[in-house]
Image (spheres, grey):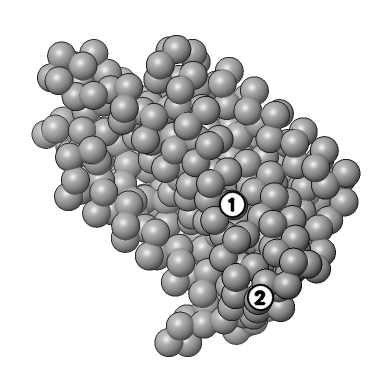
Amino acid sequence: MLELAARSRNIFKPGQGKTPALLVLMLVALFSVTQSNFLSTGNISNVAIQSSYLIIFALAQTYVMIVRGFDLSIGSTVSLISVASSMAMSHALGLGFSPAMAISSGVITGIAIGLVVGLINGVFVAVFRLNPFIVTLATMNICLGLASSISNGFQIFNLPDGLNATFYQGSILGIPVPVVAAFVLVGLIHVVLTQMKIGRSSYILGANPQAAFVAGIPVTSYLLLAYALCSALAACGAILLTARTGSGEPNLGGNLMLESIAAAVVGGASLRGGSGSAFTPVFGAVFITILSNGMNLSRIDGYIQQMILGAIIICTAFGEYKGRGS
């Protein structure tokens, strides 16, 4: 555990607190000079709300990375949940339920689907010992196919009026609901990782699975819970995104898989497991969001933006490799 703490304090390795914050400040300085409207009130508000969604997905990705895994299916899971929860809400309205009851049915449906997808991933990774890359790649395609199939490739409309007003336009003490939701989830995961046995043991499991098993840690159960929690967090983000768009989107997940991994590794989650925290995805997500926002303001092509995100992941992974070797 002392070794893990030392790794997380080194600012030249992923997992440090200072480097991601410094990167964010550098981006802010760059785009403040090159884009006159970057620091406008409207753009800052947009960045805050946009980053809150990515914080949730990066938080989900970080948790499975801590136990030496990752989830390629997170984007398609979001798409499936968006479509299925929207269909549940639309159907509930058609049956005469109140908007509040309809929204509740959608939330329950979304979280239930997230848990099922996460448990499926967890069973194949933890019980059958399959590579998480293969497992989550398969579920990515299954979820994407299901989302397109049940929606026939079209958006799902006729959602409750209060969905957008509450979960997107709403605010608590003047703070947008998506931002509040993101930091509530960050706080909850922080408690899990630092105050609960499952969280503290997850670091040992990620750093050295064999040692964790010898120490009596229930490796299979904790891996299952990690993947279930990852997809449950993704479900929360999916519902918030659906509220923003006002419809169920079979392609809502889009680039979330790439963006969530990039935000997690930039923030400090190690691809080799055993490091990271609930707060590291925050700076990573803010960095990725500001970068994307600045590139959009600069009218950089979306395909080039994807290439840049991929390069960031490679550079961060290489930096971790060199850091461990030093």
**Quarter in which the N terminus is drawn:** top left
Identified at 63% across, 41% down, the residue is: 77
Q: Earlier in the sequence, mark 2 or mark 1?
A: 2
Residue annotated with mark 2: 99
The kind of residue on which mark 2 rests is Pro
Q: Residue extending furthest bottom?
A: 174
Q: Determine whether 219 is above or below 157 in the image.
A: above
Q: Position of residue 110 (x, y in %)?
A: 59, 52
Disc number placed over residue 110 in the picture, else none: 1
The kind of residue on which mark 1 rests is Gly
Residue 236 visible in the displayed image: yes
Q: Report which quarter residue 133 is drawn in.
A: top right
Q: Position of residue 286 (x, y in %)?
A: 50, 59
Q: Report which quarter residue 137 is drawn in.
A: top right
Mark 1 surroundings within 10 Å by alpha-carbon count, few (fewer than 14), some (14 through 19), many (20 or more): many
Label 2 secondary element:
helix
Tell us which disc is closer to us: 2 or 1. Answer: 2
Identified at 13% across, 19% down, the residue is: 215
Q: Nearer the viewer, residue 164 or 22?
A: 164
Label 1 secondary element:
helix
In-image side of 294 versus 183 (left or right): right
How many numbered dots are placed on residues in this image? 2
Q: Position of residue 38 (x, y in %)?
A: 63, 74
Q: Determine whether 297 is above or below 305 in the image.
A: below
Residue 311 visible in the displayed image: no
